[in-house]
Each structure stands twice: as C-alpha cells, then as structure tokens.
C-alpha cells in the first residue's frame, strides 16, 4: 500500500480567498447529507460510477469516477468492487488513510481547491499515477468532492494521453456513464493545452 502527497501543490489562495473557501467548505459540510440524498435518491445518480472498460475505444483498464468516500458504506463499496487505487483531487480534506492501508488500497492526494481547474503539474502527476496503478492491475477511483469537475478533468486528461481521445470525446465517455460529470470550456482548454505541451494529442476522436 502506498500513500503520497502532492509533488507540486497549486499556489495558495489569498487570505480573503481562503476565508471564502473556508465558508463554502463549512456550508458544504452542513449540507452534505442533503446533497447526497438529493443526488442519490431524488436524481437517481450513483455516488461512484464505473467509466471503463470501454469497448468502443479499446479501453480495458477499470477506471471509476466519483464523489468523496465519506460513510462506512462508501469504503465498503470500494472493497466490494475491488477498487485498489484512489486518487483524491480535493484540497479540503483527505480520505481515511488508515482504512486504505489496512486494505492494500494505494492512495494519493493531489490538492486542488474547489471550483478551480487543476494546473498542468497536477494533471501530469495525476495521469502518471493512474498509469502506474493501471500497470499494476489496480482498478482506480478518481474523486473530488462530488465527482463533477476536478476529478473529471484529470481522468479526461488520462483518456487523452493514454487512449488518443480528444477532450470532448473523453467527456462524452465519462458523461455516458456519469451524468454528474461537468467540464466547462475552461477545463477542456486546460486539457487541450496540457496535452499539446506534453505531446499527448489531442486526437480527433
């Protein structure tokens, strides 16, 4: 089991920005049970979504996208589904590292503040980490708080780099399996710029 910290954390926000983020995080914590109930029971969304394997794009690795594991049932789900690698993109807090150690689940946290776009260094670290876990045969979960944008950005970048998809095609693959996925133009532009700088694409489809 391995745990890692971010090799190159993103720049710290200003004091005012930290205060705003702190208020937003406290509000999110208070509303979290209602948010979970709304997404799972009202909207009928799953908290964790299996994105691949995807035969149409010859993707054999088992990759998952989701919100943060929070309740005991969430961690039990990871074990039951054989997920053995977890990439956490949140800056807000970390997962239950002791649980992961006890169950041989590799874990890395690459902190990205909420409502921001992962920078190029973070995307590179995330893609390299996913690639290494896939090479070990570990099914991987990529998550942020709700599994919408931050986690989707780095998973899309992996699909671009490893499987030749363009960012829009990567989004379509994720969206077809997880309705909560949300990449705005700023996220897609970042993936495109990262892929071009790395020489990873993007391709046409």
Image: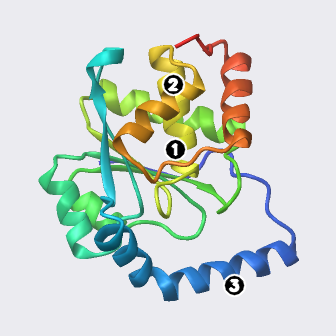
Name the foreground residue: 83 vs 180: 180
Classify residue 195 as left or right of residue 106. Answer: right
Is residue 128 visible in the rendered structure shown here?
A: no
Q: Measured along the vertical axis of the image, is residue 76 above or below residue 164?
A: below
Is residue 71 visible in the rendered structure shown here?
A: yes
Is disc 1 in contact with disc 3, using a CB cutoff of under 8 Å?
Answer: no
State the residue lying farthest toward the bottom.
30
Q: Secondary structure at mark 1?
A: helix
Q: Earlier in the sequence, mark 3 or mark 2?
A: 3
Classify residue 45 as left or right of residue 189. Answer: left
Is disc 2 in contact with disc 1, using a CB cutoff of under 8 Å?
Answer: no
> Residue at label 1?
152
Query: Which x, y percent locates residue 58?
Result: 31, 14
Gap between marks 3 and 2 measured at Cα = 35 Å
Residue 23, numbered label = 3
Q: Residue at x 51, y 83 (%)?
A: 29
Q: Residue at x 58, y 10 (%)?
A: 204
Q: Measured along the vertical axis of the image, is residue 152 above or below residue 144?
A: above
Gap between marks 1 and 3 measured at Cα = 24 Å
Closest to the camera, between mark 2 and mark 1, is 2
Residue 169, numbered label = 2
Q: Measured along the vertical axis of the image, is residue 142 above or below residue 130?
A: below
Query: Which x, y percent locates residue 17?
Result: 82, 72
């Amino acid at each position: 089991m391995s745990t890692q910290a971010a090799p190159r954390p993103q720049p710290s926000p200003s004091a005012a920005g930290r205060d705003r983020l702190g208020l937003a995080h406290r509000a999110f914590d208070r509303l979290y049970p209602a948010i979970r109930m709304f997404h799972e029971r009202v909207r009928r969304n799953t908290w964790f979504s299996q994105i691949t394997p995807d035969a149409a794009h010859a993707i054999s690795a088992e990759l998952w996208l989701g919100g943060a594991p929070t309740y005991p049932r969430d961690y039990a789900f990871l074990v039951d589904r054989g997920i053995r690698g977890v990439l956490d993109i949140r800056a807000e807090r970390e997962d239950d590292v002791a649980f992961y150690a006890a169950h041989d689940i590799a874990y890395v946290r690459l902190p990205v503040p909420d409502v921001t776009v992962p920078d190029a260094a973070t995307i590179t670290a995330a893609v390299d980490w996913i690639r290494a876990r896939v090479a070990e045969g570990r099914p991987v979960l990529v998550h942020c708080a709700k599994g919408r944008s931050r986690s989707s950005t780095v998973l899309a970048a992996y699909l671009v780099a490893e499987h030749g998809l363009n960012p829009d095609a990567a989004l379509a693959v994720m969206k077809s399996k997880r309705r909560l996925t949300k990449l705005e133009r700023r996220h897609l532009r970042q993936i495109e710029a990262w892929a071009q700088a790395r020489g990873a694409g993007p391709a046409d489809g």
